[in-house]
Image (spheres, grey):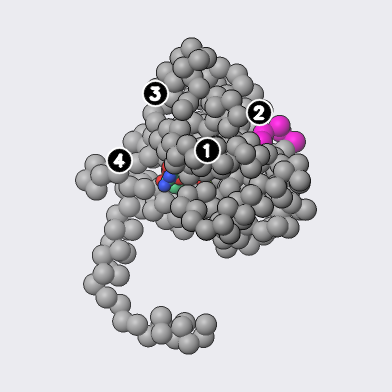
Amino acid sequence: IQARADRIQTRSFSPADQSILDRHRQLDRDLRRALERNQLRLNFQPQVDLKSRRIIGTEALMRWDHPELGPVSPAEFIPLAEETGLIVELGRWILNEACEQAAAWPSPVTVAVNVSPIQFQHVDLASAVSRALRSSGLPASRLELEITESSRVTDPGRVHAVMWQLRNLGVRLAIDDFGTGYSSLSYFRDLPFDLVKIDQSFVRNRTSAEDHRLLAAIIELSTKMDKHTIAEGVEDEPTARLLTEMGCTYGQGYYFSRPISGEDFTNLLSQPPRQKRIS
Ligand code: C2E
Ligand code: MG
Ligand code: MG
Ligand code: MG
């Protein structure tokens, strides 16, 4: 590791590095402006109960159509916003917007909102959540927060305490991207959550028998620990069927639906029950 660090430090600064820096500087400045000018949108990706194939909820995903650069992926601008601290204001906007829209959907359809670990550390998240619920009128039971652990968490004790506050408000908590990065088995022992969101890397492109057994083992472990499971990245019927057989509770992915506008999601919900089943 030391040798690698040396190599990284002595590698010279290239024109490519400069253009990445320039893009990031531009994105940071423009994101602030986009937030002020209300140019950001949420899309919603349906989540289905795998047995009945009914829509039970949706995940809110940020969309930014940059006037010059075109669509910029949240995978690019969220980490940037985390670095600059803009995620605090951005996070507040997302929470309010998601609750407002979800309040108009029929009960018990839920909305899942991604929260950054930075929000846990620098905001009174429980107060922000209860304000968003109060002003939108959305019942707490219909809001779910998706939490991803990361290296940015410097105070795990605080994360734990805030999760309990949120739990006490009555919102549901999901561990996002489970099985990758910093998520660990000790969560089952230490953290109060309701749902394990299985990372799409375990769900898509399964090729070997080991891939199957690993997926089955994650579902079995979670179920044994009294958690519901939701698989992300479901792209075809065989995967949906396999997950159902393995006892996974919910599914989300392009096979059921891409992320769509709030209007399209609302229309999907208002279709008669028979048609509302997806696939
Ligand atoms: P995530 O929370 O794990 O969201 C799932 C990502 O997988 C989304 O990408 C979604 O569009 C994509 N996806 C869904 N189904 C499929 C599928 O069947 N196949 C494939 N290949 N991909 C699928 P997206 O919208 O680009 O978001 C990327 C990440 O950005 C999210 O990962 C989340 O970590 C972050 N993000 C997005 N919106 C927000 C937000 O409002 N707040 C925060 N803090 N993070 C957000
Ligand atoms: Mg998520
Ligand atoms: Mg995820
Ligand atoms: Mg992810």
Disc 4 CB within 8 Å of nearest ligand 1 atom: no
Q: Foreground mark, 3 or 1?
A: 1
Measure the C-alpha gap from mark 2 to mark 1: 29 Å
Disc 1 CB within 8 Å of nearest ligand 1 atom: no
Tell whether position 88 is magenta: no
Question: Callout 4: helix, strand or loop?
Answer: strand
Measure the C-alpha gap from mark 2 to mark 4: 31 Å
Residue 248 percent location from the top left of the image: 63, 40
What residue is at 48 percent from the left and 12 percent from the top? Answer: 272
N-term mark: 4 or 1: 4
Outermost residue to the left: 68
Measure the C-alpha gap from mark 4 to mark 1: 31 Å
Q: Foreground mark, 3 or 2?
A: 3
Residue 124 percent location from the top left of the image: 63, 44
What residue is at 70 percent from the left and 47 percent from the top? Answer: 220
Q: Amino acid at mark 3?
A: Asp
Residue located beneath label 2 in the image: 140
Q: Amino acid at mark 2?
A: Ala
N-term mark: 2 or 4: 4
Q: Are marks 4 and 3 in contact (CB under 8 Å)?
A: no
Q: Residues within 10 Å of mark 2 (few under 14, many from 20)?
A: many
Residue located beneath label 3 in the image: 264
What residue is at 63 percent from the left and 62 percent from the top? Answer: 154
Q: Which residues are magenta?
A: 168-172
